[in-house]
Amino acid sequence: MSTPRITFVTGLVLQAIERGYRYGFDIMDASGLPDGTVYPALRRLEAAAWTRSDWEDRDRAHAEKRPPRRYYELTAEGRRALATARERFQGIDAAIPTLSTGSPRTEPA
């Protein structure tokens, strides 16, 4: 797959992951982007090796009565792409708040 373009949406998704929003619904909530934008972006970013993902433990999800979450993290290439997005889009840094450390959202099970 080709390298994704660094768009404002790409920057928002990368920034959300960097700030601790690690699964789709959290990224949607943090960015205000709809699922039809976030999930295709996540697939493109992972195919380009800007992110990598891992599924949480099914037993934990089952105990919480929900489907397993797919957790994303930035790669070195993703961090470089985010730096480019920050240079290109003024104010993008203020678009996504940082989660407090220790949040259950920041670590896959």
Image (tube, rainbow, N blue to C red):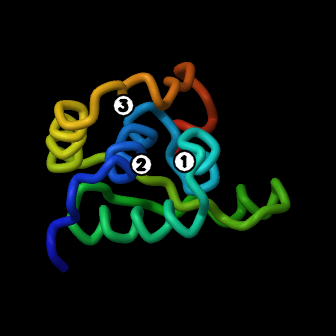
Mark 2 to mark 1: distance in Å? 7 Å
Q: Nearer the viewer, mark 3 or mark 1?
A: 3
Q: Is residue 71 left or right of residue 52?
A: right
- Which quarter of the picture shows residue 41? bottom left
Q: CB of mark 3 within 8 Å of CB of mark 1?
A: no
- Which quarter of the picture shows residue 24? bottom right
Q: CB of mark 2 within 8 Å of CB of mark 1?
A: yes
Q: Is residue 26 left or right of residue 13?
A: right
Tell me the number on the disc at residue 27. 1
Q: Is residue 5 visible?
A: yes
Helix, strand or loop at label 2? It is: helix
Please tell me which residue is depicted at 30% across the width and 55% down the height of the picture. 51
Helix, strand or loop at label 1? It is: helix
Badge 2: few (under 14), some or many (20 or more) residues near its Cα, within 10 Å? Answer: many
- Residue type highlighted by circle 2: Val
Q: Check the picture and name the quadrant holding the N terminus.
A: bottom left
Please tell me which residue is depicted at 30% across the width and 46% down the height of the picture. 74
**On screen, residue 83 above or below 34:** above
Mark 3 to mark 1: distance in Å? 15 Å
Question: Which is more toward the observer, 83 or 56?
Answer: 83
Tell me the number on the disc at residue 88. none
Tell me the number on the disc at residue 13. 2
**On screen, residue 58 above or below 109:** below
Tell me the number on the disc at residue 92. 3
Q: Of the residues under marks 2 and 1, which one precedes in the sequence?
A: 2
Q: Is residue 109 visible?
A: no
